[in-house]
Amino acid sequence: MAQNDAKRALANKLVQLQLKTDGPAITDQLTNSAVQPIVAGWSQRLDETVPPARQKEVRDKLDVELKKFADSTHKSIEAQVGKAAEAAMVPIFMEKLSEEEMKTIIAYMESPASAKLQALGADATDAWAKRIIDSTRSQVEASAKTFESAADRIVKAAAGGASGAAAATKK
């Protein structure tokens, strides 16, 4: 029983370290995943229903409300991140990791080397992403042009088809 308590304590400590490392990113990611569909839906609805001359004014008002929604959502998610982390990860850590493995992981996560790696993480990831963007830019741009051409043909055909149907209905 004491060994199980010691293992649980290590699992809890590991969760706290993981939470410190990944909690803010998970909170932001989940908030963005809740906000983006709303932004996309309302942006399209705005374009379809509000006259162009009034769109900026309406967008500004919507941005205020969207900020309220995003802040509220962020707070709700943030309040659950810690609770969910412990409930989700402690059982997994206890089942999948030995006490010795958890001690090793914790020692590394608390080490200066881990802190240094975490500090370099954003720069390393940015450099990596830049390389990917630079090496794929021409293919992505070519694919985007292909999509734009296809989308333009589809929309023009639909608009022409709708106009033709409307003209036939009038006759």
Image (cartoon, grey):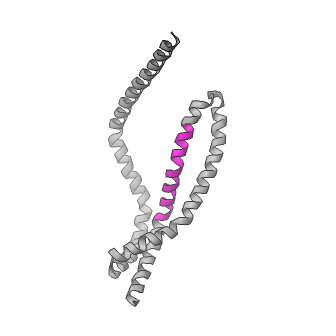
* Quadrant (top left, top right, bottom left, bottom right) of the N terminus: bottom left
Q: What residue is drawn where x is 45% and y is 77%?
A: 12
Where's residue 134, x and y in %?
Answer: 36, 42
Q: Quick one: 4 or 126, which is closer to the camera?
A: 4
The region drawn magenta spans 22-43
Q: What residue is drawn where x is 54% and y is 49%?
A: 35
- Within the image, what quadrant is residue 98 found in? bottom left
Q: Main secondary structure of the magenta part?
A: helix
- Within the image, what quadrant is residue 103 found in? bottom left
Q: Quick one: 119 or 44, which is closer to the camera?
A: 44
- Within the image, what quadrant is residue 151 found in? top left
Asked if residue 39 lies in the magenta stretch, the reply is yes
Where's residue 148, x and y in %?
Answer: 40, 29
Relative to 61, is 82 above or below? below
Q: What residue is drawn where x is 35% and y is 81%?
A: 99
Relative to 27, is 163 above or below? above
Q: Is residue 53 left or right of residue 36?
A: right
Q: Quick one: 122 or 81, which is closer to the camera?
A: 81
Q: What residue is drawn where x is 55% and y is 63%?
A: 78
Relative to 55, is 134 above or below? below
Where's residue 64, x and y in %?
Answer: 65, 46
